[in-house]
Amino acid sequence: MFRFLLLIIFSISIISETKFYVLGTGTPNPNPERGGSSYLVLVDQTPYVFDFGSGVVRQAASLTSTWSGENRFKVEDIEYAFLTHMHSDHTLGLSDLIITPWIMGRKNKLHLFGPKELDIMSKKIIEAYNFDINYRITGSQPQNPSGYIVEFTEIYDGYIFSNHHIEVEAFRNNHGDLYDSYGFVIKTEDKKIVISGDTAPSKNLLKKSIGTDILVHEVYSSSGFKKKTDDWKIYHKAHHTSPKELSQIANRIKPKVLVLSHVLFWGSDSDEIINEIKDEYSGRVILPNDGDLID
């Protein structure tokens, strides 16, 4: 009996701890308070980045003890990054993600997962920074010759990555005419997290999200939408999700927490957006600030 109790205590003690941070909640609009789309999953202090809009590395750094944050990981530990789609507000931080952790001491390759065009982008970035990279490797304070190198994996519908920490599944969403646009299902020992990516209502998301702890979903303001011209209404309806539609999605999925991100405010404030959703959804809804921990 005593051995059995010890086994239970030991099993509980070794369960991984997962933390989920929203690094950037913004859109292509240059809101000074909201950086480009980006999320950080920490599993036992190992970081995994999902989307890398502008400001991604500095926002991640703000969470570390190096910069008065609460976490032990360092930016040079960032070795895995996953991309939903190739739009600029999700990719502008790629050069930072390739170069800055290397400058800070990353020795291993950066493993990138995303649509095939991401491979081209990463190679062009390294080419553009060739002078700086060579200077840092051969200068008086030489950097290691490997930490800026990218190892790319093209994603598709299905499981795209797993190790002892985490399992990542990609699924195609519904972002207008953009075929290579994905959401992610992220599973760890203690969490299931779904990131919608930029999308109108998606049947794939509904199928993949049942039983999720955290659903991160984009949304636009209903009141702002009404002020748009007809051509822009057609565009946004095909590419994004209204509060009413998101309420219906959340009522079907029933996540423990619904996290609003990539919010098109169009003059509305956070309370108005949340209230538009809670008109038809009674679950927990959060519209976080950049850098917030979601629990």
Image (cartoon, rainbow, N blue to C red):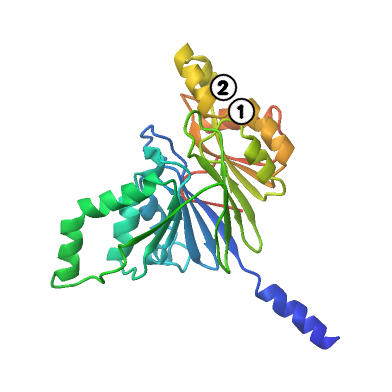
Asked whether residue 90 appears in the rendered view, the answer is: yes
Cβ atoms at labels 2 and 1 below 8 Å apart: yes
Left or right relative to 284: residue 145: left
Question: Looking at the picture, does residue 166 appear above or below residue 1?
Answer: above
Question: Distance between the Cα atoms at labels 2 and 1?
Answer: 7 Å
Please state the total of marks drawn on the protein image: 2
Residue at x-position 30% and y-position 68%: 146
Res. 282 in view: no
Label at residue 1: none
Q: Nearer the viewer, residue 283 or 160?
A: 160
Q: Inspect the image, locate mark 2, and give the three-letter code of the amino acid beneath it.
A: Ser
Secondary structure beneath dot 2 equals helix
Q: Amino acid at mark 1?
A: Pro
Q: Position of residue 97 (x, y in %)?
A: 35, 55
Would you name the residue on which mark 1 appears? 243
Q: Is residue 282 above or below residue 130?
A: above
Query: Mark 2 sits on what residue?
Result: 222
